[in-house]
Image (cartoon, rainbow, N blue to C red):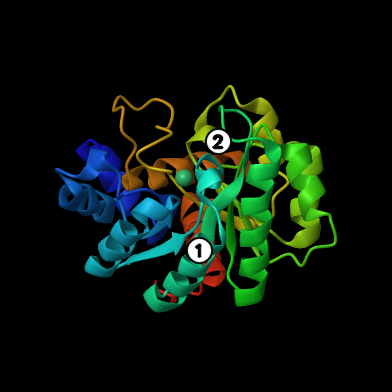
Amino acid sequence: MNDITTELHAALPPMIDTHCHLDDRQFDLDLEEVLSTSRKANVSRWVLIGYDPERWDDVIVLAQRHQGMVHTLGVHPACAPAWNDQVKLRLKALLASSGAVGIGESGLDFYRDNAEFEVQAAAFTEQLELAAELNLPLVIHMRSAENQMLDLLGDGRRIPTLLFHSFDGSERLMDFILETDSYVGIGGLATRQKSDGLRKQLKRVPVERIVLETDSPYLVPARQKERRNEPAHIATIANAMADLIGITPSEFAAQTTTNAEQLFGLNHVN
Ligand SMILES: [Zn+2]
């Protein structure tokens, strides 16, 4: 981040990175500096997404150590083979004892060479049911799996509040999102001019349903030199999206912060 960018972004209302993996080893050496840069860009709260049972303890400790950090716990489709009754019981216990603000990320991913459908679907639907039972939002990871996902969600199950993280869906998925009042997580993908189909769908989302995310250290936004993504880039995403939907970056930042507070049950800060 150069100084000019930081200054420009500091003019925006406080923002929240609703999806980041700051427990990743890539932040081991300089996390405090990354957080300080983030605060300067007015991104002063972070939702850490726990996706692997083996990392849940680290995620909890990290969130407890930092002001402004909260966390979710779940089992990512890439970790779906680890799902069993014992893991489910541990998840339930840790969600309660650690004060997690949601479940996830969980979902389906047939883009990578993950487990077969049945294995991923079992882990996903049980987390979906758990979220409904505990009245927690579910953070959904979905890649090359849209029809399978919609079939599972439309199967007469109780649907909790859903957040489609790193949204990259079609018209059919967007129809579902609008019907169910689900949330859409918008990150670096939306800043790429090439993502025309995506940007067309994003224009349909009511601004009350959008939250911002970086997925740090993954998904570096367009026109950035660094290879590691950081929460400070939320401001870049806010500017790009505000431009796309035609409202001011300040209005957009304020509204998406309110949305994230409502979704995750956080206190209102302005
Ligand atoms: Zn993620």
> Residue, x 68% and y 56% (percent of image)?
125
Tally of marks: 2
Report the mark closest to the observer, 1 or 2. Answer: 1
User: Between residues 120 and 33, which one lies in front from this camera angle?
Assistant: 120
Check the image and name the residue furthest to the top: 194
- Residue, disc 2: 190
Relative vertical location of residue 194 with respect to residue 142 in this rendering, above or below: above
Counting from the top left corner in percent of width and height, residue 127 is at 61, 60
- Residue, disc 1: 86
Relative vertical location of residue 115 with respect to residue 18 in this rendering, above or below: above
Whether residue 246 can be seen here: no
Q: Kindly identify which numbered label has been placed on residue 185.
A: none
243 left or right, relative to 199: left
Relative vertical location of residue 196 with respect to residue 184 in this rendering, above or below: above
- Say which element carries label 1: helix
> Residue, x 62% and y 68% (percent of image)?
130
**Badge 2: how crowded within 10 Å, few (<14), some, or many (20+)?**
many
> Residue, x 25% and y 37% (percent of image)?
1
> Residue, x 75% and y 36% (percent of image)?
170
31 left or right, relative to 167: left
